[in-house]
Image (tube, rainbow, N blue to C red):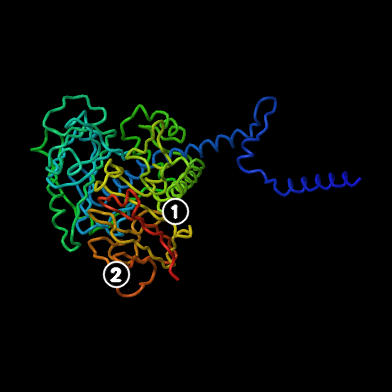
Amino acid sequence: MKKVCLALLAALCLTACDQTTKLPPSHYDRLADQPYIESYPLKADIGALKQELLFERGVQAYLWALPALNMYGMKEGSEKVFGKGYNVLPIFKERLNAKTLITTPNSDVIYALGYLDLKQDGPMVIEVPPGLQGILDDFWQRPIRSEGQIEGREWAGDVGLPGPDHGKGGKYLILPPDYKGPVPSGYFTYRSGTYGVFVFWRGFFKDPKQLSEPVKVMEQTRIYPLGQEATARSMVFPDASTTPANMLYPQDGYAFDMLSRFIDHEYVDPTDMEMRGILAGVGIIQSKPFAPDAPTRDLLDKAARTAARMGHVLAYQPSAMVPNGLYYANRHWINPFPTNATFTADTYNVIDARTGFFTYAYSTSPGMAVNMENIGAKYPAAYMDADGNFLRGSQAYVLHLPPDIPAAIFWSVTVYDPITGSGLDNGQPFPSLNTMDKPVQNSDGSTDIYFGPKSPGAGKNWIATVPDKGWFTLFRLYGPTKAFFDQSWKPDDIKKVN
């Protein structure tokens, strides 16, 4: 009798536990469990499945197109303010401040950003001056590859000091993806994967009060259509530091309008046909107007806003498919470049890493991903403090950097807006601190950088944050040395200050 009672009690407990742990049907349960009546779904359920398909296509189309959206946002925002054309090369002559909205800019170098249209102008010649450092990407933000070998090797993206001219200057010829004409000699010849080409020059300075030299180098750039050197439009170099521009990509349904403009103008790459089919499913087809009805536009707006949030999450919490997502096993520093400049593995594209990167950044080159001492740069990113909590603008923090920071050229710390990725508009001239600012060091040679809405006091290194607004930081190391790679030197996590 006692055994029977115990068995009944156990059964009752299991039933009670099952009732308490059973979750109500989710949205996905309802989709998966739609009934078949004599082997067919109910007509009323067909609409729900189609609506879900549209939403899912919208999300995946947005994530797939994110590198192009980021680039097109920069292009259209720049052209609206500074003008359009191969001869327009805006230069941030007084550095890039937080009034210009663009994803994770570096305030501690001089930038020049230009946009070419090979569909309209054909093959383009870029005369690169001596002493330049730059990148050439297509509009998917892939490094443009050399047409065959130069000096016995293939090149991709890098120009100037890290490129085939080795900083001596030279003429680069950029061919459209479908160009079939003769290719003249005497050039460093590259072929773009898109009609759009991003020209990205970077200039370094040693004194923040002396910026004219890198600007002068950039102003020696000449860009013109092949064979039209004598008749080409004269170059203009607007000072982009003096006029704010919004160069961000949309994080809502307007992203699909921008994507339609991009697709309508661009080269049809045979490798993109499957995803172009997904785009056709949401109404984006080359040479046809994108004109969704109100319900479709509403659903695509929700899809874009959902996808944008996914991109943010993949940036500050790398997925399991991303190798080397953290720089250090016992730190919260994210590695935004965990693979290579094209985000490819042996048998697949690392799309989660690519999505996280282009949510908050633009441009790639082999030099940005290479792991070689004193070469390129590294960009550890922090979104969380030492306790694993997101960084808040109302809280005070400190970042301790041990002595002998492993950067052969220079290092910098910059704060950004977690939603847009643009520089945090914190009221300071630039939302950053770098080697050239000669930050205060402790007696042992270490450096403490303070973050918060109020100054920690005279004699301390302070980057202001904004109450009621979160922030994240990039710790840039140009020319990382051995101590960075063997991890004999590590930055501390960012810690709260009471």
Where is residue 105 shown, x and y percent of the image? Answer: 30, 53
On screen, residue 108 versus residue 319, left or right, reads: left
Residue 417 location, quadrant? bottom left
Numbered disc 1: secondary structure: loop
Please give the residue where the numbered disc 2 appears in the rendered image.
443
Task: Say which label, 1 or 2, has the lower sequence index.
Answer: 1
Residue 273 location, quadrant? top left
Name the quadrant of the N terminus: top right
Is residue 261 depicted above or below 491 in this figure?
above
Residue 492 location, quadrant? bottom left
On screen, residue 120 versus residue 391, left or right, reads: left
Disc assigned to residue 330:
1
| Residue closest to the far right | 1
Please give the name of the residue rendered at 41% of the width and 66% of the height, measured from the top-left corner. 397
* Mark 1 in CB contact with mark 2 (< 8 angstroms): no
Q: Amino acid at mark 1?
A: Asn
